[in-house]
Image: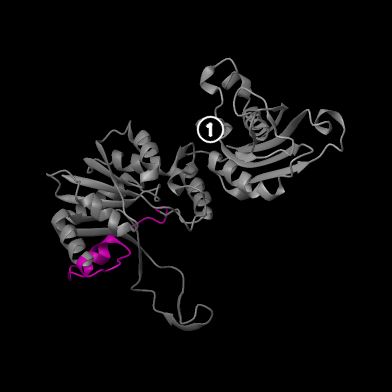
Amino acid sequence: MTTAILAAAGRGARYGANRNKIFEPLRGRTVFEWSLQALADCPDIEFIVVVVNPADRAELADLCRDCAKPVRLCIGGSERHESVWNALAVVPENTRFVAVHDAARPLIEPTLISACVEAARVSGAALPATPVSDTIKRTGDGATTLETVERAPLRAVQTPQVFELELLTRAYSQGRAEKFPGTDDASFVERLGRPVTLVPGARSNLKITVREDLLIAEALLAERLGEHRVSEIRTGFGYDVHQLTLGRALILGGVDLEHPEGLGLDGHSDADVLLHAISDALLGALALGDIGHHFPNTDERYRGVSSLALLAHVARLVREQGWDIGNIDSMLIAERPRINPRVREMRENIAAALGCSVDQVSVKATTNERLGFEGREEGMAAHAVATVRR
């Protein structure tokens, strides 16, 4: 039996998002779902072990629920090789071969997986690789070149990397004993003196490392699916207002603030006027109604609820419709208190709830020059504009 190990416990630091990059949307699904589907569609894969970050376990378990192949989750380590070692301990007992694949390679095709499995059945170890096409320079300081490296014998390796279970377990056991920080599974096997068979890889089998990679993956996947990629963008507008009153907390952008007069915003939820305007803008962009429709003030489930939770729910609705969030521009209208010292924290809260980058979220504030209900400090208002792209 061949068991696939899907490495999904990374944190994607180089990608620059607030969450694991495998949750990034890609043609209506997450990066992770495309990788899982490819393994499930491969007739040579019979069981899948998904290595997860503890923080992502619940969400990944939900994404694996409808997989056509049996799936087992295990907790990963701080480094990739630690995650694979943990997975080796929980593969089914009748496993003979393991195929280790990076969840950040969503464009892998079942035919390439099968080719690697077939090669490993012959030699005991195989991986996909492509010739290096760029001229390679060696440098001593990262700023100047020392020499040009002969590229003919060089190969850029990919995943899945397939091995006999006994071989990979022995290689990892020795590597761990020697504290060897291998960068891929094959590097551990090579230390045993075992060559690894190279299978012709595919340049489309790219790894999502930086944001540009996701754009390339979208274009490649659109071509594979026979789609004509049309960049459709929509815009939504949101507005909300809440009355100021004594005895209520003042929460704006998910941040607890203090009003000089001890005032807070009145409402059924936490009355975060800024987040309500943003939620309405996103819902409006897709003609999905307003927050009163989705979270009515007659429903006790939403009494006192955090508006960050409501905003995260709206973000899920947006993605379920096949859209991604482009940017948010919001404006708070209030006389007091000053929010500038806490704006960065607000933007981070909003970005985390939406699953996007902080640089996609703008929060501004202005007074109403003592005019109107905002100027009289009877209440606060907020406006927001949201753009979404298919």
Which residue is at a point 26% across and 36% down the rendered structure image? 69
The N terminus - image quarter: top left
The answer to whether residue 143 is above or below residue 295 is below
The answer to whether residue 99 is above or below residue 305 is below
The C terminus - image quarter: top right
Residue 380 on image: x %, y %: 74, 31
Pick out the residue farthest to the top: 298
Left or right of 44 on screen, residue 318: right
Residues rendered magenta in the picture: 177-205
Instruction: Please give the residue where the numbered disc 1 appears in the rendered image.
Output: 309
Q: Residues within 10 Å of mark 1 (few under 14, many from 20)?
A: few
Q: Main secondary structure of the magenta part?
A: loop
Quarter occupied by residue 339: top right
Kind of residue sitting beneath label 1? Ala
- Residue 161 appearing in the image: no
The answer to whether residue 314 is above or below residue 77 is above
Left or right of 41 on screen, residue 246: right
- Which residue is more in the foreground, 217 or 299? 299
The answer to whether residue 56 is above or below residue 268 is below
Count of numbered labels shown in the rendering: 1
Which residue is at a point 48% across and 42% down the rendered structure image? 26
Residue 168 on image: x %, y %: 19, 59
Residue 235 on image: x %, y %: 68, 34
Which secondary structure, mark 1? Answer: helix
